[in-house]
Image (tube, rainbow, N blue to C red):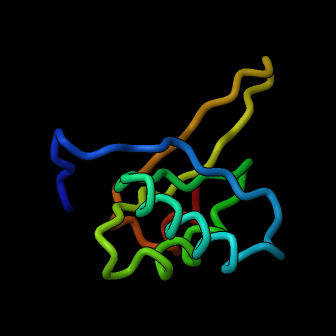
């Protein structure tokens, strides 16, 4: 696991609602993150982790830390962000 240093800037979470926008949106968000100095991203969507690989690919070798996850909603209407370690593999995420 890669540890994040205290001098890094994070944006949590990044939510892309349409799979048709990936990987173009992932590339654009990664480029904008670099431009504005954000180096830590949590990639989430409602009950879905399918966008994570596009962000991992776009961030590869670019000094951007991508934390995968998803957002769920309880029966009471509370939204919860579930964010996992960077090295959580896609297959394991799909099980959640």
Residue ID at (51%, 73%): 90
Q: Is residue 46 above or below residue 73?
A: below
Q: Nearer the viewer, residue 74 or 2?
A: 2
Assign the N terminus to one quadrant of the image: bottom left
Residue 62 at x, y percent in the picture: 34, 75
Residue 78: percent from left, percent from top: 71, 21
Q: Residue furthest top?
A: 76
Q: Residue at x 69, y 39 (%)?
A: 72
Point out the image quarter for the C terminus.
bottom right
Query: Which residue is depicted at the point 69% across and 79% down?
Result: 24
| Vertical side of 9 occupied by 57: above or below | below
Task: Give the image location of residue 20, x and y in percent.
Answer: 83, 76
Q: Does residue 24 appear left or right of residue 56 in this picture? A: right
Q: In the rendering, at what x and y percent does residue 88 appear?
A: 39, 65
> Tag count in the figure?
0
Q: Is residue 91 left or right of residue 76?
A: left
Residue at position x 41%, y 63% in the image = 34
69 over 31 or under it: above or below: above
Q: Residue furthest front?
A: 35
Q: Specify whether 32 is left or right of 18.
A: left
């Amino acid at each position: 696991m890669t540890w994040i240093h205290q001098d890094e800037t994070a944006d949590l979470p990044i939510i892309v609602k349409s799979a048709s926008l990936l990987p173009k949106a992932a590339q654009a968000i990664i480029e904008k993150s670099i431009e504005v100095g954000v180096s830590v991203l949590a990639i989430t969507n409602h009950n879905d982790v399918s966008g994570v690989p596009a962000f991992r690919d776009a961030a590869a070798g670019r000094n951007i830390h991508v934390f995968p996850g998803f957002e769920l909603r309880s029966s009471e209407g509370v939204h919860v962000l579930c964010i996992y370690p960077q090295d959580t593999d896609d297959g394991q995420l799909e099980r959640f």
